[in-house]
Amino acid sequence: MDAIERLKKEVELRFRKTPASPSDFDALSLAISSATGENVSPSTLKRIWNYVKYDHTPTHSVCSVLARYTGYLDWDDFQKSEGITDVSDFIRQDVLRAENLEKGTIVEVRWIPDRRCKFLYRGNGEFEVISAVNSKLQAGDVFKNTLMAEGEPLYCTDLRHGDESIAGYVAAKIRGITDIQVKTPSAG
């Protein structure tokens, strides 16, 4: 999938819908304007989403507005996020280890662009999602995790997502978690 298609998917996730009608494109244009203070016309959005036949690539400035709508600085920032290479490294910063948490601890994690989830620690390395905003994880999902660290992806294993059992899920894959907040039951 190329960068433009990925950007469109990010826009759809933020908009919570794939635009498919003239009124959808009007609403998306308004949502972008409200969020960024910048305008992208409904007709331009129709061309980008191939609702109207158009064989050209969107301009850098339009892509930058869409990238800002999804939480990036601009189109260049979004493209840099696409070009992360596979590099091995040690995790040296402070980490949140599941083994050190009390049962009932609430952990809130955030990552770009504008995603956040709250988890309830159930013990034995198991977490339950109690709220999720702009994430593929959903309230009620249960997963295992051994450690979380800012700047690193969130790895969820043995995920129970609705009626599905999934081997794993990676959140914040490109830039990592940007913030971790912990509230222990004893802090109350």
Image (cartoon, grey):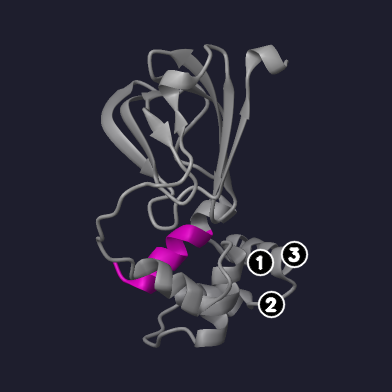
> Residue at 56% of width from left, 85% of height from top?
61
As measured in the structure, the alpha-carbon distance from the residue carrying label 3 to the one carrying label 1 is 5 Å
Image quarter for residue 81? Answer: bottom left
Mark 1–mark 2 CB contact (< 8 Å): yes
Q: Which amino acid type corresponds to the residue marked 3 in the rendered image?
A: Ser
From the image, tell me which residue sits under label 2: 39
Residue 81 versus residue 8: which sits nearer the camera?
81
SS label for mark 3: helix
Q: Nearer the viewer, residue 26 or 177?
A: 177
Mark 1, secondary structure of its residue: helix
User: Does the magenta-highlighted stretch encompass residue 14?
Assistant: no
The amino acid marked with disc number 2 is: Asn
Q: Identify the residue at image location x=38%, y=19%.
A: 125
As for residue 4 lying within the magenta part, the answer is yes
Place of residue 140 in the rendered image (x, y in percent of width and height, measured from the top left)? 49, 21
Find disc 3 in the rendering and name its residue. 34
Confirm or deny contact between disc 3 and disc 2 (CB under 8 A): no
Mark 1 or 2 closer to N-term?
1
Q: Residues within 10 Å of mark 3 (few under 14, many from 20)?
A: few
Q: Which residue is mark 1?
A: 32
Q: Amino acid at mark 1?
A: Ile
Name the outermost residue toward the front: 92
Q: Earlier in the sequence, mark 3 or mark 2?
A: 3
How far from the left and from the top, in percent, is residue 114? 59, 52
Q: Are marks 3 and 1 in contact (CB under 8 Å)?
A: yes
